[in-house]
Amino acid sequence: MERVIGIDLGTTNSCVSVLEGDTPTVIPNRGGYKTTPSIVAVTEAGKRLVGHIAKRQAITNAENTVYAAKRLIGRKWDSPHVKSALMTSSYGIVEGPHNDVRIKLRDRSYSVPEISSMVLQEMKIIAEDYLGEPVEKAVITVPAYFNDNQRQATKDAGTIAGLDVIRIINEPTAASLAYGYGKDFDRTVAVYDLGGGTFDISILEIASQGVFKVISTTGDTFLGGEDFDARIIDWLVSTFQEEHGVDLRQDRMALQRLRDAAEKAKCELSGVSETEVNLPFIISTGHNEALHLQRSLTRSTLESLTQDLIERTIDICRQALEDARLDVNDIEDVILVGGMTRMPAIQGAVGRFFQREPNKGVHPDEVVALGAGIQGAALVEDRQEMILLDVTPHALGIMTFGSRFEELIPQNTTVPTSRAKIFTTSRDNQTAVKILVMQGDSQNAEENEFLGEFVMTGLRRAPKGHVEIEVTFEINTDGIVAVKAKDLETGQAQSIEVTASSGLTDEEIKNMVKDAEDYMVERRTDEEFEAAKQQAETLVDSIESLFPDVERVVGSADFGRDAIAKARVIVDQTRTAIDHKHTRKVKDHLEQLERTERMFKGVVSRAQ
């Protein structure tokens, strides 16, 4: 049966899993790590770097190294969150052609889904190397509070990466699947998910029959570890400026060093009460004088710097309980997900709010990917013993007169679902009506996300309010929204399937897919060459080390001189093929090199 991988496309790190038999397994990358940094860079030579190798060169190539792209995916250029990112980013963020966000690396602008696709393609390669076979299908997770445009942008990223994304599921829901998989119990759980860039809280009912039902979900798609790091950076920058009168934010390399140091200090303070931030030669004053930054940061200082961020997550937890119409006493287990939940202050705040010790039985960095892998296997194997009932994270509706938002499907409605509402015309003799489909939680339509529109024409002429139009919203398990409008008197109807936009055209996506395919061919060719090169160089080194002994033993005989001469020819030809990166020729020489090495070793062995 075709394998389906589960991918947690994270803000800071990404993770990939697969179900092996009945065991969900996280797949390690070539370095043996189970998570890969969600970092992409382009070198001066134009080479793409992804993951650990991109992270290692971030300081010396800060302007061309992208981190936390997930915080920008599916957002409009004029979004306040994009403006916030512009203020703190060490790489170039520019406006795209469709009011979307593009990232400038070297001499080219990339869309955010394109950057994310590079991380997803790396996850695909990791899985294929592990499984020893091509992988086409994937389930990818997203923050529960993502809107439809952000979900579509994530799906487009998967398409560009060469993946058939068979389902997008919410991160807390995926975590609950991994938590409850194979267990036979009935529990009401809260999944508190604080990652690198986003926060979600979901309340779920897990039934012994394998039913996972989301009751409520809410969150903040711009609240996470990046914000905790930013508080440490602000503290370091302000104290340095007070002492030296220099703003370190003006230097991109210094800012990247601060980012790395802040993240490291934050992680260390989960285990110790005090750590030192030591950044020698952080900046030059321009008078051949270098300045150094050295500060001690205590856990209590970090907690005071970030207390309001922690409180924001607790306020959102409170809202989730209200939406679910439950009390903290109704929650039987609290599952912590995301790297930030290692912070003792967060564990303490969550424990106090829910009045119980949080469950630490799941791996905060791996559980989401594991759940995605479980869901992927369930979808292709059509497993009936597992039923997932999710909800809409945002209300769906239309814009009405006065730019008001008229809700048809409320937030936290279980999907699939269908809802209808009757509206009347607002002008005398009105013969057409424009239906603007929106998603969001504000009563002011302009503050919500625009999803699509269609115009219903040919209405009968009548006084204002005399034409009744029934608008019906349908949403399926994939989150696809269909909207239908019908004149109740004439029965005339018109409909639209609302396709959320990632800010990319079909043509752009098609070109990006082609670029990704070309990269994959080049990448596999390079890997094939490197493998052949290593094998050939090992054999060449071995043969060359044997030349003196072979010449001593058989060098005086004609057959010996002939064998040595042929060996030198094949060694020289191999070195030339390696210098010209000619993979086929290098591979063609391997058998002859192996034969020569065996013969030389045999000659030397017999002489001893």
Image (spheres, rainbow, N blue to C red):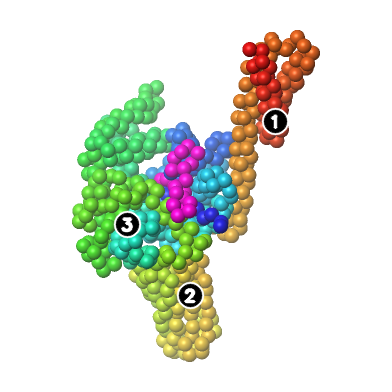
Q: Which residue is mark 1?
A: 591
Whether 388 is drawn above or below 468: the answer is: above
Residue type at tag 1:
Glu
Quadrant location, the C terminus: top right
Residue range highlighted in magenta: 12-34
Q: Position of residue 160 (x, y in %)?
A: 56, 53
Q: Which mark is residue 191?
A: 3
Q: Which residue is mark 2?
A: 483
Image position of 440 (left or right of 549): left
SS at badge 1 = helix
Q: Is residue 128 magenta?
A: no
Q: Position of residue 309 (x, y in %)?
A: 28, 50
Residue type at tag 3:
Val
The answer to whether any part of residue 601 appears in the image is yes
Please rate how many residues cluster around mark 2, counting C-alpha atoms within 10 Å: few if below 14, some from 14 to 19, many from 20: many
Mark found first going from the N terminus, 3 or 1: 3
